Image (cartoon, rainbow, N blue to C red):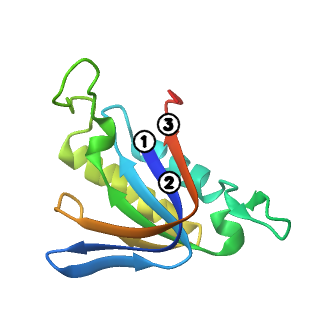
Amino acid sequence: MRAVVQRVSRARVTVNGGVSGEITDGLMILLGVGRDDTSAVAVSMAERIANLRIFEDAQRKMNRSLLDIKGSALVVSQFTLYGDARGQRRPSFVAAAPSEQARECYEAFAEALRKLEINVATGVFGAMMSVELVNEGPVTILLDSAKTF
């Protein structure tokens, strides 16, 4: 599983001109599911992200987590995080999970965040979406469950 995690003051996703998810202070999470991922991997990744200390404390050090600040999360499925463009112009997406597996893991990830009492908004799985956000810092973290980076 791969995630692009951005610290935001606001973010929203629209589908067909309507807002499907919107948050204020928290994290914008673009989530890609790989062929080897399971619901257990999704739960582990959700806990990891919820506990990432990327919010500032009183001394302006990144010592606080999403749980600490009681922030929200906007989770958007993005299979293109598994795009492989090494040595070619057109990315290959063979490492991305098939749609049904990806949907199951995506939903397990969002539910795991909710169980941690995080307010979760989402995009629409598989839809063409427009994402808007204000990245604060800017702070952007890349995560991979296989720890390849």
User: Which residue position holds label 1?
Assistant: 2
- Residue 5: numbered disc: 2
Residue reaching furthest to the top: 87
Instruction: Determine the CA span between mark 3 and mark 2.
Output: 13 Å
How dense is the environment of label 1, judged by Cα within 10 Å: few (below 14), some, or many (20 and up)?
many
Q: Is residue 84 above or below residue 143?
A: above
Say what amino acid the circle numbered 2 marks. Val
Q: Tell which circle, 3 or 1, labels the residue nearer the N-terminal end.
A: 1
> Which amino acid type is shown beneath numbered disc 3?
Ser
- Relative height, residue 86 to residue 119 (above, below): above
Decide if residue 54 is on the left or right side of residue 83.
Answer: right
Classify residue 50 as left or right of residue 101: right
Which residue corresponds to the image point at 20% horizontal and 31% vertical from the top-left? 91
Residue at screen point 56% across, 76% down: 25
The residue shown at (27%, 53%) is 103
Kind of residue at disc 1: Arg
